[in-house]
Image (cartoon, rainbow, N blue to C red):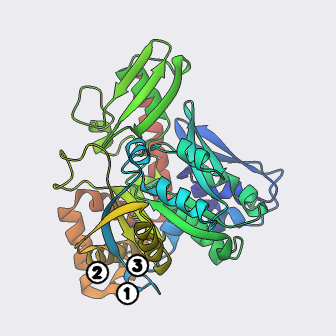
Amino acid sequence: MKSSVKRHLVVNVCSGCGACIGICPVNAIVPVDIKGYAGLSIDTGKCVKCGLCVKACPMIKSVEDSSTTTIVSRENSIVRAFLTYATDLNIRYRGASGGVVTALLIYLLKKKEIDGALVVKMDKTKPFPLIAKTAEEILKAQGSIYFPTFSLSILKKLKAMEGKYAVVGLPCQIDAIKKLIDIGWLPRDRITYLFGLQCHGIFAPWYLDYVLKNLLKLSKDEVYEITARRYGWPGKIFVLSKHGVYVVHLFDETISVWNPLSSSNLNAQLPCIICTNHSNVNADITFGDAWMPEVVGREKIGVSLIIARTKRGSELLERAVRDGVIRVEEIQTNLASSESIFNYDKELLTTLMNNGIIGVASKYGLRGLLVVVARLLFYRESSRRVLLALLPPKALFYILYARKNLLHKAINKL
Ligand code: SF4
Ligand code: SF4
């Protein structure tokens, strides 16, 4: 891919992970709002063209790298799934889904296996990344944030600190950390655990303005604080404003964030449309909601569906269960097989993006071509990705950019 296109992608098709800001040696990159989407601005006067930002960007990886490692072939990789929750009722109730991330981080701190963890907490209405070094700081970061956090923007600070750390992140953030470990920028022995959150997309910042203005009839400066997904499962979003507290539901209510805009992915930050790593395959443990028939409608306090992906992650879970920190119930699921299909899709799509249909035919043969056709015919989500993937990267960039501008115009008319 040409470097000019790469630069466009870094700046305009940004997932908001913050890795480039966090590693730029001359602090030339700052987060900016680009027509309601989280984006970046590079000060070309400061930039020394070291190329680190492009190397760290997880979205460049996802559109460029066709040699994606599959989870089933990773060394040491194990895929075991559990339903789980924290045994401390307070931690469990205050977490987004069972408080397991919080309970494990506090456990690791107490055992002195980590000196801190990179987490994100809400500071009034804005996400705020921090390196939490005490149980109190970790507790303050409970809950969910559905908007870009730029949490890896504090990586230089993390690297400069002594000790061992856990990183909690979305798939694009964990992918960026993995890239930085692979290129030697971040020593692996300093990052003891990668805790990955499942993610099916985050909202572009304009959507917060939309929810406040159109659903709650509030302006942003009337809002003091927003907390999401705390106090029971699946939880709600509380908006504390100068007119009182408003409750936004996840779905099935008049005021809910899961509306036609969300279900059609129209409110997503742009890279989420082409992202294929929703289950965070590079983490040691993946944490997500248990949207399963045996849980939905019955569970009220909180439970997570977690996946142990490495020996290190699996052993941590075993110790935490033995020491009474979490409870787990292993569930039999065909995760390995579904993830292998998922990774096959991803490799196919990245090959399509880089080498076109001829590349797919020569690398994957008739089966690959049939998969492309089947996805186009039967899967709405995948069809969109395949259609995007069929386009050369430059066309992909311009279409995403045009879509962003059109949406911005439409939203301003609401
Ligand atoms: S190329 Fe290097 S100096 Fe320039 S913006 Fe990227 S990381 Fe910063
Ligand atoms: S969907 Fe993918 S690109 Fe979007 S925030 Fe989640 S992991 Fe990042």
Image quadrant in which you'd find residue 179: bottom right
Say whether marks 3 and 1 touch (CB < 8 Å): no
**For this rendering, which residue is in front, 36 or 155?**
155
User: Residue 15, image x and y in percent?
Assistant: 52, 52
Q: Quadrant of ligand 1?
A: bottom right
Judged from this view, the residue extending furthest toward the front is 323
What amino acid type is highlighted by mark number 3?
Ile
First along the sequence among labels 3 and 1: 3
Q: Tell me the residue that label 3 is attached to.
A: 71
Q: Tell me the residue that label 1 is attached to.
A: 363
What amino acid type is highlighted by mark number 1?
Lys
What amino acid type is highlighted by mark number 2?
Gly
Image quadrant in which you'd find residue 340: bottom left
Asked which secondary structure carries label 3, the reply is helix
Mark 2 or 3: the one toward you = 3
Cα distance between the residues tagged 2 and 3: 19 Å
User: Residue 145, image x and y in percent?
Assistant: 47, 43
Asked which secondary structure carries label 1, the reply is helix
**For this rendering, which residue is in front, 317 or 225?**
317
Vertical placement of residue 45 versus 363, above or below: above
User: Residue 239, image x and y in percent?
Assistant: 44, 25
Mark 3 or 1: the one toward you = 3
What residue is at 50 percent from the left and 63 percent from the top? 195
- In-image side of 21 versus 10 (left or right): right
Q: For the N terminus, which image quadrant?
A: bottom right
Q: Tell me the residue that label 2 is attached to.
A: 368
Say whether marks 1 and 2 touch (CB < 8 Å): yes
